[in-house]
């Protein structure tokens, strides 16, 4: 792609019914990821340049009951750009009340989840992607939430429940009429879960159906894929989920490419080791020693993916429950690689990197 085509993104203003609009200077957004986008990870990704970070999905009923763990999930990352809290639920009143609580905790934006495919949520609670099958109830939830708070409310959804009911364009129109400020579309149906390939072309129909900003989501694991997703969808920005695993710096790389057309190198391996250690210590401090060590394992695995001897390193790490011992093992694993000048194959020539699956 010619550099004359850049920038591919520009600032997006989110308004809807909000008294306080929010401007995304760079609409490259960290997706809400259950068990991943906790406060330590959001803080790190935000510090490293993301245009917006979104919390893990939070059940509205748990927020209303002021469940201690739920309120903790909604904690806001201070400083930098805006932060969003994502809510899920099937009752308009509960969603509205939960949104008020989240704004009281400091949320700059509220995001509504109509995309979660998990059976417990979509079938058991009739929330998440289930609401794409009930447009009337979806409209009631959207409007009640947008009217409840003075910050912009956004929506994340899929293409539809299945390929026989691809109603995301119609739901985008409903969202706009309900006072929603932006819609994000994951290019899969609920029935696909995370299988197959995200359909970025479909999202062009959502963009045509509404004047709202539209964000494309799904399978964006490289700078070139981000540009391709924008070109094929006509969207205003990208949301990155699994592409950020073990790469909290990746969203800034995407911003750099989409704004200048220039690929920027990832941090050196020595710098990656220091980022990993800082992240690991933040997880332990936030969740406590026992819980933190266990929660950190997947992150350490993602950081180390593609490095020489990483499989044996991960196997050894997963047998350790002592945080200090894990840190010592991280030094023991990384330091010889750094001394040897080791470079991941996927970082030679800034080629595409495939993140380790969850």
Image: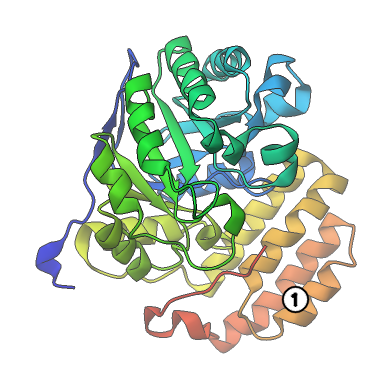
* Residue drawn where x is 37% and y is 59% of the image: 200
Mark 1 crowdedness (10 Å alpha carbons): few <14, some 14-19, many ≥20: few
- Give percent across and percent down for residue 339: 59, 84
- Give percent across and percent down for residue 203: 34, 52
Q: Quadrant of the N terminus?
A: bottom left
Q: Quadrant of residue 120?
A: top right
Q: Quadrant of the C terminus?
A: bottom right
Q: Is residue 352 above or below residue 41?
A: below
Q: Nearer the viewer, residue 190 or 102?
A: 190
Q: Report helix, strand or loop for mark 1.
A: helix
Most extreme residue toward the left, as rendered? Answer: 4
Judge left or right: residue 187 versus residue 208. right
- Give percent across and percent down for residue 74: 62, 28
Judge left or right: residue 283 versus residue 353. right
Residue 286 in view in this figure:
no
Q: Nearer the viewer, residue 196 or 335?
A: 196
Residue carrying label 1: 332
* Residue drawn where x is 63% and y is 15% of the image: 94
Residue 331 in view in this figure:
yes
- Give percent across and percent down for residue 314: 77, 73
């Amino acid at each position: 792609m010619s550099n004359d085509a850049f920038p591919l993104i520009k600032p997006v203003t989110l308004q809807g019914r909000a008294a306080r609009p929010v401007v995304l200077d760079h609409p490259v957004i960290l997706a809400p990821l259950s068990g991943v986008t906790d406060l330590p990870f959001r803080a790190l990704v935000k510090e490293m340049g993301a245009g917006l970070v979104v919390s893990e999905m939070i059940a509205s009923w748990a927020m209303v009951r002021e469940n201690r763990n739920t309120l903790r999930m909604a904690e806001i990352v201070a400083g930098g750009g805006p932060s969003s809290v994502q809510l899920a639920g099937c009752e308009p009143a509960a969603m509205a009340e939960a949104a008020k609580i989240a704004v009281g905790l400091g949320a700059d934006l509220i995001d509504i989840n109509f995309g979660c495919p998990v059976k417990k949520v979509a079938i058991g609670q009739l929330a998440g992607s289930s609401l794409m099958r009930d447009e009337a109830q979806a409209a009631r939830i959207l409007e009640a939430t947008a009217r409840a708070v003075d910050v912009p409310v956004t929506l994340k959804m899929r293409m539809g429940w299945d390929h026989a009911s691809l109603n995301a364009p119609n739901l985008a129109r409903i969202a706009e009429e309900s006072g929603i400020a932006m819609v994000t579309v994951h290019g899969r149906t609920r029935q696909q879960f995370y299988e197959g390939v995200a359909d970025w072309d479909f999202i062009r129909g959502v963009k045509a159906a509404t004047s709202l900003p539209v964000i494309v989501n799904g399978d964006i694991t490289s700078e070139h894929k981000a540009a391709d997703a924008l070109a094929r969808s006509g969207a205003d920005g990208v949301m990155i989920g699994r592409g950020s695993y073990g790469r909290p710096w990746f969203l800034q790389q995407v911003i750099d490419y989409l704004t200048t057309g220039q690929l920027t190198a990832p941090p050196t391996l020595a710098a990656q080791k220091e980022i990993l250690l800082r992240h690991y210590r933040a997880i332990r401090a936030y969740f406590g020693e026992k819980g933190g060590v266990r929660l950190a394992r997947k992150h350490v695995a993602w950081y180390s993916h593609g490095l020489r001897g990483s499989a044996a390193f991960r196997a050894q790490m997963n047998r350790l429950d002592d945080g200090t011992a894990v840190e010592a093992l991280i030094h023991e694993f990384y330091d010889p690689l750094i001394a040897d000048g080791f470079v991941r194959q996927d970082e030679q020539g800034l080629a595409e990197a495939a993140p380790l699956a969850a």
